[in-house]
Image (tube, rainbow, N blue to C red):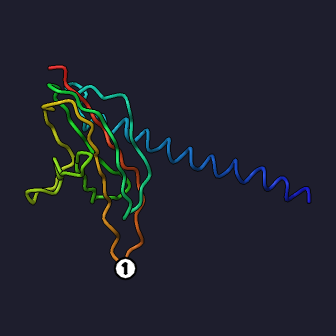
């Protein structure tokens, strides 16, 4: 009976440690790779690091405010062998403003100047794994920066 009590105490601590370690790795990835892709010499990060471990087939929506007259850069990157990451920037009516796959060329970033104050959704999608493959899991980071110029 005493062993079962100890097990119920140790297991949650162990699993909490695994979750924290994974999130910590994703934050490190976002800071190193994400800031480099954002080009922090020009764009100031908005102060939020949106990074999570996702698997193929997962979706993620990030809600962000954008202000009139500011130039922005949105960067979406992935690690650990996840090469296919699609993202769209949409308004609250789900009207597509930007699609990373539009024009036949896949991109991982988008620069634009906001014409008005608006709240937009950055919708990230990892395509499903092929039926013969095991779904891959890796960190996905969404970073937004703005230029003072």
Q: Quadrant where the N terminus lies?
A: bottom right
Q: Residue furthest bottom?
A: 132
Residue found at x 27% / y 37% = 119
x then y, percent, for residue 127: 30, 64
56 vs 139: above or below: below
Q: Residue furthest front?
A: 93
Secondary structure of the residue carrying tag 1 is loop
- Which of the two residues, 23 or 148, is positioned nearer the viewer here? 148
- Which of the two residues, 114 or 134, is positioned nearer the viewer here? 114
x then y, percent, for residue 147: 19, 25
Residue found at x 70% / y 51% = 12
Picture quadrant of residue 110: top left
Q: Quadrant where the C terminus lies?
A: top left
Residue found at x 39% / y 36% = 49
x then y, percent, for residue 91: 23, 45
Residue found at x 16% / y 55% = 106
Q: Residues within 10 Å of mark 1 (few under 14, many from 20)?
A: few
Mark 1 — residue? 132
Residue 4 is left or right of residue 76, and the answer is: right
57 vs 77: above or below: below
């Amino acid at each position: 009976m005493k062993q079962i009590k100890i097990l119920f105490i140790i297991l949650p601590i162990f699993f909490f440690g695994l979750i924290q370690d994974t999130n910590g790795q994703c934050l490190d990835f976002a800071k190193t790779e994400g800031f480099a892709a954002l080009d922090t010499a020009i764009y100031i990060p908005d102060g939020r690091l949106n990074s999570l471990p996702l698997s193929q087939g997962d979706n993620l929506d990030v809600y962000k405010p954008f202000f009139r007259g500011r130039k922005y850069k949105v960067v979406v990157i992935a690690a650990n062998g996840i090469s296919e990451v699609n993202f769209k920037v949409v308004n609250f009516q789900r009207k597509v403003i930007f699609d990373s796959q539009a024009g036949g060329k896949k991109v991982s970033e988008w620069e634009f100047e906001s014409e008005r104050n608006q709240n937009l959704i950055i919708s990230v999608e990892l395509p499903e794994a092929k039926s013969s493959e095991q779904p891959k899991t890796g960190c996905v980071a969404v970073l937004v920066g703005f230029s003072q110029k």
